[in-house]
Amino acid sequence: MTGGELLEETKRRFIQLLKFQGDGVYRRELQSEVVISRPLSVAEAIGDPGRDDFPIIRGREVLMQATFKGVAGQAFTAASGDFQGTLGDVLALPLDENFERAVFIATMNAALRYLGKIEKTVHCRDDGPKRCSSLAVDWLRDQEWEMVGLVGLQPAILEALVKAFGRERVMVSDLAEAGSERCGVRVLDGLNSEEIFEQCQLILITGSTIVNGTIDDLLDRAAEHDRRVVLFGVTIAGAAYLMGLESWCACST
């Protein structure tokens, strides 16, 4: 897929789902319901995770939260801003910019949760990221792989992977951290990380790639190399459900 095709198809399927709720009767009240979306503070988003190297703490991203009929949905993004309008207003957004995509994704996650289609749309807080990284290691022990790739630097997960499996079995890429070394692993450029798809049989990709517009290219490269992809985090919850993508987010609520 290229040029935001996955996001556009996700939007199309979301609209179709809304139209056919309730014996095929279009739920117009869903379009008229007011949606409020705003970036959360660090304390609201992740509390105190016991470390200061998360991108949201370093100011490189924010967690956007949308509230629909009292239900929350979230999405990570590098763009920040406030939005208030109806669900119809959200569906009319052009999705050309990160902020628009974040509002749409967060709102879709909230609406799908309200409709009972998905769960786990609110990010874990405090010791949640640490527990998540431990559970990720346990989950990976049951999978078949020789090397694992992490696209999008989640520092707690990377640290746990390196401690459990050794740095020689782990690869990571990230736009902001490209060229640095984390946990003894060289961070590749997120836009030029072909090595990960060539060498890793299992690749964990942050769900925020659907917001920053890189998910299509990443999934295309994974398909070219016949690699298994697991998308992680709250951002991808709704899209994974609608598109039948494999996802993992152990500690969100």
Image (spheres, rainbow, N blue to C red):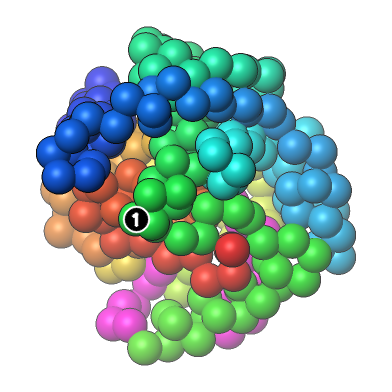
Hey, what amino acid is under mark 1? Answer: Lys
**Residue 3, image x and y in percent?**
26, 21
- Is any part of residue 117 visible from this angle? yes
Residue name at image x 60 percent, y 37 percent:
67
Question: Residue 163 at x, y = what percent?
Answer: 64, 80
Which residue bears the numbered disc 1? Answer: 117
Q: Is-magenta flag for residue 162?
A: yes
Residue at 45 percent across and 49 percent down: it is 114
At 34% from the left and 38% from the top, the residue drawn is: 215
Position of residue 247 relative to residue 179, above or below, is below
Magenta segment: does it hold 156? yes
Q: How many marks?
A: 1
Classify 37 as above or below 210: above
- The residue closer to the viewer here, 197 or 248, is 248
Picture coordinates of residue 224, whole percent (x, y)? 14, 48
| Badge 1 density bin: few <14, some 14–19, many ≥20, Cα 10 Å | few
Q: x and y percent of residue 209 in the render? A: 44, 38
Q: Nearer the viewer, residue 75 or 161?
A: 75
Q: Secondary structure at mark 1?
A: loop
Q: Which residues are magenta?
A: 143-165
Vertical relation: 177 (above or below) 89 = below
Classify the position of the N terminus by image quarter.
top left
11 relative to 81 in the view: left or right: left
The answer to whether residue 165 is left or right of residue 63 is left
Q: Does residue 205 appear in this view? A: no
Name the quarter where the C terminus is drawn: bottom right
Image-quadrant location for residue 109: top left
Which of these two is toward me, 111 or 129? 111
Above or below residue 147? Residue 108 is: above
**Residue at point 38% right, 56% down?**
116
